[in-house]
Image: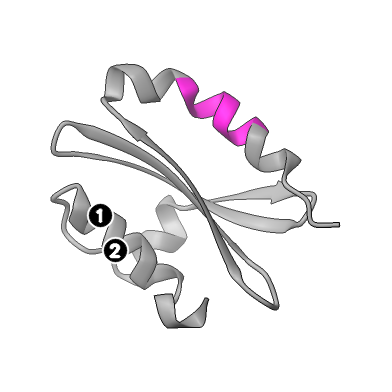
Amino acid sequence: SPQGGNTLENVNRWRMQLGLAPWKQDDLDRDGTVVPTQAGPALLVDLEGGGQKLLGAILNRPDAVWFVKLSGPPAMASPLREPFISLLRSVRFD
């Protein structure tokens, strides 16, 4: 929902949870990846800090904002990046 903040604010909330410094919009533009989904483009960020890895995607829809996250120890979460992206690509709203 819009009350949750804009995309940059949400990514920075995740970064804070990992003990990372906040990004500026230029950082997000450079390091975020747009993943096409069946429901429109999702913005994917791949963050690591504090002994954790977070793969997070934000999908802005006219009626709501959807978040898809995967987090865990880097050794467990890193190999799941491609399956996570495949899952994102399959998202659709009927």
Residue wearing tag 2:
12
Q: Looking at the picture, tell me which residue is in the foreground, 67 or 47.
A: 67
Q: Is residue 53 left or right of residue 41?
A: left
Q: Residue furthest bottom?
A: 3
Q: Is residue 16 left or right of residue 91?
A: left
On the image, the x and y values in percent for residue 23 come to 27, 64
Instruction: Classify 10 Å Cα crowding around label 2: few (below 14), some (14-19), many (20 and above).
Output: some
On the image, the x and y values in percent for residue 65 come to 57, 68
The magenta stretch is 80-86
* Secondary structure category for the residue under label 1: helix
Q: Residue at x 78, y 51 (%)?
A: 92
On the image, the x and y values in percent for residue 10 come to 37, 66
User: Looking at the rendering, in which quadrant would you find the C terminus?
Assistant: bottom right
Query: Does residue 54 appear in this view?
Result: yes
Residue wearing tag 1:
15
Q: Residue at x 16, y 58 (%)?
A: 21
Q: Are marks 2 and 1 in contact (CB under 8 Å)?
A: yes
Q: Looking at the picture, tell me which residue is in the foreground, 82 or 61.
A: 61
Instruction: Please state which amino acid type lies under the numbered disc 1.
Output: Arg
